[in-house]
Image (cartoon, grey):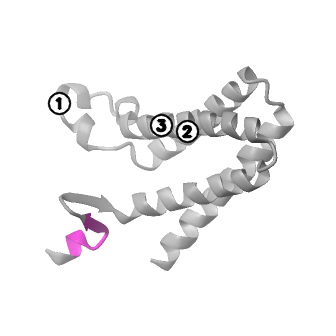
Amino acid sequence: MKELFMDAVQLGPFLIKKTYLVLIFSSMLSFLYIAILLRKRTKLLHKVEEVLTSGLLIWLLTYKFSIIFFRPSILWTNPYGVLFLTGGTEGVYLATFVFIGFSFWRFNISNISLKTSIVILIPSLTITSFAYFGIMTLL
């Protein structure tokens, strides 16, 4: 029974998976990179933070509800399963592609150049990926 909860941390009444905590930490490292990169351009930094925060929320919702896309029969067989299950690895890939597309679209609307968008997004995603997989390897 104890092995079941070794991949989670209990904070009061909440049980949080360690992978989610590592993902949050990895994302915070990416935000730190962006803050250092744009420290002298505060207006641009605020626009980028707004876009990426919205994108992160869209990533989370896409990941959580991607099971509907990959297994639509769950709506008929187990509708409450949509709330408790995630899209798995395929959901992560789908959510990441949606996040990238959404971010480029919002950067374009905000009149942020494509070069600046690439300098922000590609290293940020790389930092998040390497930090996440590096930490998960150590755990």
Callout 1: 10 Å neighbours few (<14), some, many (20+)? few
Q: Which label belongs to residue 57?
A: 3
Question: In this rendering, which labeled residue sits more in front, label 3 or label 1?
Answer: 3
Kindly identify the residue that appears in the image at 61 percent across and 60 percent down: 29
Q: Would residue 103 appear left or right of 122 to someone viewing this image? A: left
The x and y percentages for residue 32 are 65, 57
Viewer-proximal residue among 49 and 102: 49
Please rate how many residues cluster around mark 2, counting C-alpha atoms within 10 Å: few if below 14, some from 14 to 19, many from 20: some
The amino acid sitting under disc 2 is: Thr
Q: Which residue is mark 2?
A: 53
User: How many other residues sit within 10 Å of disc 3, few (<14), some (14-19) or many (≥20)?
Assistant: few
Q: Marks 3 and 2: CB-CB under 8 Å?
A: yes
Instruction: Tell me which label, 1 or 2, sits earlier in the chain.
Output: 2
Figure quadrant of residue 63: top left
Tell me the CA gap for discs 3 and 1: 28 Å
- Over which residues does the magenta segment extend? 3-10
